[in-house]
Amino acid sequence: MLLLRCHLKRALPQKVSCRFCAVMGKLQSKFKHSTYKYRPDGFIEEKIQTKAFQEYSPAHVDTVSVVAALNSDLCVSGGKDKTAVAYNWRTGNVVKRFKGHEREITKIACIYKSSQFFSASRDKMVMMWDLQSSSQPRQQFSGHTMVVTGLTVSPDSSHLCTGSRDNTLLLWDVGTGQCAERASVSRNLVTHLCWVPREHYILQTSEDKTIRLWDSRGLQVAHTFPTQQHIQTYCEVSEDGHKCVSCSSGFEGEGCEATLWDLRQTRSRICEYRGHFQTVASCIFLPRALAAMPAIATSSHDCKVKIWNQDTGACLFTLSLDGSGPLTSLAVADSISLLCVSFSRGIHLLRVDRSQGLELREVAAF
């Protein structure tokens, strides 16, 4: 009994501590975060610090599922409250709420630097919204028989591609709302879609552990990457369209990786990023302004955001959002900021700090 009490006392400082005080209409919070900095000699520096950051009023009244950047000031998020919220993450203000879905919003796709975006839901519907018009959807897209789990817009914004757990991809004309193409592959339970910049191709991940490249001209499979060992949860394409990154499910370090692929001629695996201990839910390419080298960021159900050297696979920095629950979505906000969604604490604003090497810290939550 005495030994047990000793262990409990030592464990207490590791728990998340939170204090609130009013600061100009906002709440200032103090959470204990663990960060890990990786040195070239292989030594890992661990820092456990209590840092103050701004805690704004929550954007949602229930769990947030997804976030995407609309422009350098605004993001759009959706979740279990069936509401899409346009939010100014610089000021901490809700700009507009969009209600129309009957169930949880699963995906958001924005037409970047415009006022328009799309939302997909467990109600099998996709809706188009405009920040400059009413709170009613401008267009509705109905055609799937199960939850919509993939959503991406063509580079010229004329077409929309959706995917579902019904094994089907649908290509839509944005202007008319009509389905232009339909394709189905057995066991192809779609988890994410991403349109390749300046191309006709669409990248897709699936619960059948497969990554497919579709040609939107006729909606045919153009290439299938080697089948992976675990469910592929997410994918993103680099701005130049030359590479893509995917990530996988897993548990206790088995799986839990992100993989970099060549999208040009060889379409082969380039690099793997291993270090998470639970499902990796999101992976993104970081803008060059964020890091001195090509870099990738991942977020995981293990409450950690990691930054990786894209070329070598080395982990450069880890931010542990203790007490946040699984991290489910990650997006670039601007040239120095990321947006991250957690199951328990909503949306986190993360800032890259290069004053003492590459570091990542939380500066706000909403």
Image (cartoon, helix red, strand yellow):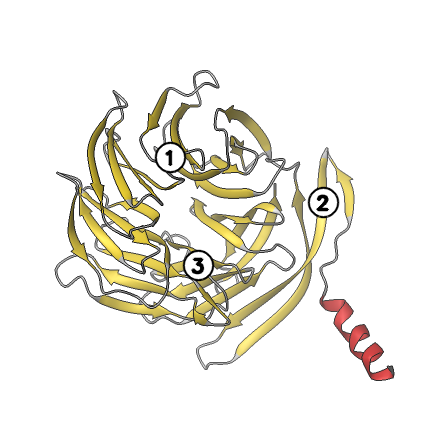
Q: Residue furthest top?
A: 134
Q: Which residue is mark 2?
A: 28
Task: Locate the C terminus by quadrant.
Answer: top right
Task: Relative to 315, say whether 366 is above or below.
Answer: above
Q: Are marks 1 and 3 in contact (CB under 8 Å)?
A: no
**Is residue 344 among the parts visible in the rendering?**
yes
Choose between 198 and 143: the one closer to the eye.
Answer: 143
Q: Residues within 10 Å of mark 2 (few under 14, many from 20)?
A: some
Task: Relative to 27, say whether 94 is above or below.
Answer: above
Q: Which amino acid is tagged 1?
A: Cys
Q: Residue 74 at what x, y percent from top left?
A: 48, 34
Task: Locate the N terminus by quadrant.
Answer: bottom right
Relative horizontal placement of residue 265, taking residue 276 as reference (left or right): left
Residue at x-position 43% and y-position 16%:
133
Image depth: mark 3 or mark 2 in front: 3
Relative horizontal placement of residue 158, taking residue 117 as reference (left or right): left
